[in-house]
Amino acid sequence: MQKIPALFIVNGDKYELLIDPHALLVEVLRDELGFHGVHESCGEGDCGACTVLVDGLAVLSCITLAASVRGKSIVTIEGLAKGADLNTLQRAFVTHHAVQCGYCTPGMILSAKHLIDENPHPTREGIKKGLAGNLCRCTGYNKIIEAVLAAAKGGE
Amino acid sequence: MEQTLRVVGKRLPNKENFDKVQGRADYCATITLPGMLVGKLLPSPHAHARVIRVDTSRSEQLSGVKAVISKKDDPRKVFTWNIMTFQLPEGELQDMYLFDDIVRYPGEPIAAVAAINEEIARQALALIEVEYEVLPAVFNIDDAVKSNASLVHETAQNNIVFPTSPIFCYGDVEKDFAESDVIVEGVFSTSKQSQAGLENAGSVAEYKNGRLTVWSQTQLPHLAKRMIAKALDIPEGMVRVIQPFAGTGFGAGTDLCTELFAGLLSMKTGAPVKILLTRNEDLRMRWTREHIVKIEMKLGVKKDGTPLALKAKYTGDGGAYAGKIVSGCAVSLASNITEYEFKSMYQEIEAFYTNHVACGAMRGFGGMQSSFPRETLVDEACEKINMDPIEFRKKYHRGVGGLGWFPGTEITSCGLDECLRVGAEKVGWKEKWQGWGSKKKGIRRRGVGLAAMGWLSGAQPMLLEHTNATLKFNCDGTCTLIVSPGNLGMGAIGSHCQIAAEVLGIDLEDIHAPFTQDTDITAFDIGTHASRGCFCIGRAVFKAAQQAREIFFNRAAKKLKVPVDRIDMKNKRFFLKDDPENSQKWFSFEEICQDAIYSFGHDCQQVVSHASVEPTEFAPPWQAGFAEVEVDTETGVVDVLKMIIVHDIGKAINPNFVEGQLEGGQLQGIGFALFEDMMINQENGTILTDSFNKHKIACMLDCPDHEALLVELGDPTGPFGAKSCGEAGIFLQAPAIANAIYDAVGVRLRDVPMTPERVLAALKNGL
């Protein structure tokens, strides 16, 4: 199949490449551009592990055609820290032990970022609703909720 | 002791999480090697068939295909994915071949391909021609035991994996039942839950310079190494297993899955090969929770509650291969022994083959199937003798010196009374529990229930639990800790670092521990299973650290030119006990470390402290679980309003890690209790629930008000008094919720998951 030219702005940097028209966003980010923090699990939009931000919105990269987000600004987990300085959410996830196996973590943190960007002062219930699309099998969610609450307050 | 701890007991971060929150942690799913090929498996469409012919020629000719393996490539070595078989002297049954003449479940791999990309690999699968002779199949035990039933394994008459056999019995149950004032009994069923970690099953293999390196999600790297060598018929020394971060576990890593196929493909192609299953493939092919389909249990007690007799029979549906079904049943009955002082016990197990995916292990192995029937029957017995269910448990649980799971074992500590006290207070038992026979009214009715259990910290002395730890010291006063727990992110390595830092008198920052496990570097270790990581490996770490401390004390004494008993160490400084403030007479820990590496007095020594341990003690963690539920009598929906578990951890090396394990277990336990089930199509043996929208696991909205509280009374055998917490979070949701449902609506549920359909049916039948 004929490849198509595409430009993606990932974590602020421009990448120009040729992609399959049917390539999924997760495939391009992970396999073509090497952003290994984009984790795939269900492959059909059930689990949220592959969540990235596209123009600020939390998007499931496993069911998004890469071609549909050409030219848009994409943020992956690799784009949150400023150099060695972790983002508040990342620090809060470590401090509150909101991470175990860590496979859902990148998607969870990016969904949480979207949630806090939209609503800087979420309630516990608001967090539950906002992050219900991100499955975690390890933590039982309590410590994730605590981490997001703490990060929203600007602390760890 | 308590006041002097500097590192142990603190909520310090798990260092590996800095990598994980930045997306910089490598998993099998993310590992990429130069020239790596994509491996894919061709699944059998049939539940049971003879493979007459596999023609791979067209597939092999496709451009971009590097290898196709099938029956003709089978090394014909019998093995099992169940790598824990090596922990028993006689082993568990090995009944698998890589590509056998018979396929025994839908989805069983018939062939595998390696190609330059995913798309070509898929095309290559489609070009493989297979001719089958379809055989009759059995999908449940009732059919499997019929006299004319098709045999899943020709050598297993009547599809028996393990014949009905009594184990660990004592006393005379029939006599004790005759003397019982109250007898309660029931027939129960439990589900084939999927571990369902978010990283799909996968592995990478690279055959290079005559050695095979396999990146695996295994929880037991050294046992995986041995089994890979056996199955692929190569010397064990030629296999190296690396466990990067694993995005799964919960028992799934105690069995192999894709490793052997990736390994053989890499040996054929000479290139690295990755096989990563899709979620659908993972749920169809990966071994599930030990599937105990039927539990018959009977308890006899005196009017005052005195427990007299317990009789039980566990029936396991192994699926296509023996896997861990026999040990699952055996652990079920063994875990009944510890809880109460029954005068006599008679328990049997039996297990059968059927034509669906086999079962391995999941968190709460066997204990799910003992705690649910036992704790609900205890509740029934308490009602019949009109006794508060908390009182029964306080009065009749076993205590220190009592019988552990296995003959000859003794309980070393018990904090259950405290767990019950704390939990009852927290849930408001006195206010909420209105006594037996309280009639609730309305469409939505509330109830409370409780359950209790005692578990283990490693499966010694029944299973080999050989474990090792090595500390290698650097010249800057830091050290590298080398352990091999099979890292699933549970915090075991973090706990080991805290133990080492505490014993050595240095800081957590001074301990470096590779998160990746590599069998070329680590000493032998059983790995992670049976809640052993902190207790067993922690003991090896404790011992290695003590030995190292002694070495450094001796070196410091030599430098200070005094006998070793005259010096002490504090704040990372060696000093004279009788002259602690003399600044001329002290050395920092760093100076002593540096002097060992760069000794210009001809006294160089690379300090490496190694400890091998084989724990034998039975240090059970105890737990009380309390549920408050609201049952909708019109829909059968059970809402969990509150779920509290109180866990006797002995000592929490890091309370964050312990709570994390317990809270994670809670939601898996609520899933087991209410909605998780692997449904098998009874027409063709396929898994119906092969995606997250069919096999539902709890999301945040399913997350009730839940809490895990810790009781820390210590254990004489654990490192700093610690016992286990890896599995314990998951046991008590099903029985406590079932007992709370009874309190709310007066019906007893015998089957998990307790779905709305089952609750409604029970309400209609007034069970």
Image (cartoon, helix red, strand yellow):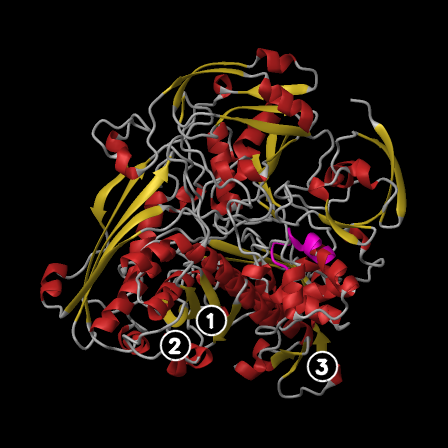
Image coords of residue B330 (percent x, y): 31, 50
Q: CA distance from mark 3 to mark 1?
A: 54 Å
Q: Chain of mark 1?
A: B
Three-letter code, disc 1? Ile
- In the drawing, does residue B303 fall left or right of residue B615? left
Q: Quadrant of residue B325?
A: top left
Element at label 3: helix
- Disc 2 target residue: B420
Mark 3: which amino acid? Lys
B94 with respect to B2 (left or right): left
Residue ID at (74%, 69%): A152
> How far across and down, in percent of the image, does residue B219 sit?
52, 48
The residue wearing badge 3 is: B585
Left or right side of B201 for B368: left
Q: CA distance from mark 2 to mark 1?
A: 11 Å
Residues at marks 3 and 2 on the same chain: yes
Q: Which residues are magenta?
A: A99-110
